[in-house]
């Protein structure tokens, strides 16, 4: 299937950023406790998460990997997960301490990426992709109106996400600093 020329990896990433507020809005409709809007919000965030896979495959298959894309894609990911966590925390459905730990790591790594950008953008590695998977699905479980009998699974999944967030953050910095010297 051939896509129109205006559909580029970077345009998909930018569209993801532009559409994040719709997912946030859906989370807050009817005070955030409406079963149907919880499902709709989950779907919006899920589809936006899938665009992360789409833009990466599109960039590689069309040989359109750019420095802007290498930088913008992780920023879009952080905006997506951050907006979901902050919204859920405001609604009292997600622990603030997890939001703070994950956002501190994500913002810290973004600032670090900017500080080393003159040496070339460091693309995400496999650990970062696994971390993102656990973060996205973990937060997604908090969006859904799950039965309390499944909270152990949701919480365990998010626990793995927090652990991976910290470990991959340390690894990323160590890796970047070793390349610098």
Image: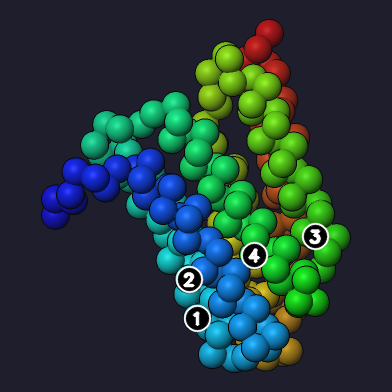
CA–CA distance between discs 2 and 1?
Answer: 6 Å
Position of 92 compared to 79: left or right? right
The residue identified by callout 4 is 84
Quick check: can you spot residue 181? yes
For residue 68, above or below residue 101: above
| Element marked by disc 3 | helix
| Element marked by disc 2 | helix
Disc marking residue 98:
3
Position of 4 compared to 27: left or right? left
Q: Of 96 and 135, which appears nearest the observer?
A: 96
The residue identified by callout 2 is 44
Disc marking residue 53:
none
For residue 9, above or below residue 34: above
Mark 4 burial class by Cα count in 10 Å: few <14, some 14-19, many 20+: many
CA–CA distance between discs 4 and 2?
Answer: 11 Å
Q: Position of residue 109 (x, y in %)?
A: 69, 35
Tell me which numbered mark, 3 or 4, is placed earlier along the sequence.
Answer: 4
The residue identified by callout 1 is 40
Mark 1 burial class by Cα count in 10 Å: few <14, some 14-19, many 20+: some
Q: Are marks 2 and 1 in contact (CB under 8 Å)?
A: yes
- Rendering colour mode: rainbow
Name the residue at 67% across, 75% down. 142
Name the residue at 41% across, 53% down. 15
CA–CA distance between discs 3 and 4?
Answer: 12 Å
Tell me which numbered mark, 1 or 3, is placed earlier along the sequence.
Answer: 1
CA–CA distance between discs 3 and 2?
Answer: 22 Å
Mark 2 burial class by Cα count in 10 Å: few <14, some 14-19, many 20+: many
């Amino acid at each position: 299937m051939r896509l129109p020329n205006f559909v580029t990896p970077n345009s998909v990433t930018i569209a993801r950023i532009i559409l994040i507020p719709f997912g946030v809005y859906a989370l807050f409709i009817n005070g955030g406790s409406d079963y149907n809007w919880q499902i709709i919000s989950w779907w919006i965030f899920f589809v936006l998460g899938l665009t992360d896979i789409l833009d990466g495959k599109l960039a590689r298959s069309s040989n359109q990997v750019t420095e802007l894309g290498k930088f913008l894609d992780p920023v879009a990911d952080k905006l997506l997960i951050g907006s979901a966590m902050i919204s859920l925390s405001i609604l009292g459905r997600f622990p603030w301490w997890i939001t703070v730990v994950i956002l501190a790591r994500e913002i810290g790594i973004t600032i670090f990426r900017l500080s080393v950008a003159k040496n070339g953008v460091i693309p995400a590695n496999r650990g970062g992709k696994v971390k993102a998977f656990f973060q996205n699905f973990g937060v997604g479980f908090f969006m859904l109106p799950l039965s309390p009998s499944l909270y152990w699974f949701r919480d365990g999944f998010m626990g793995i996400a927090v652990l991976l967030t910290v470990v991959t953050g340390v690894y990323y910095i160590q890796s970047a600093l070793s390349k610098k010297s």
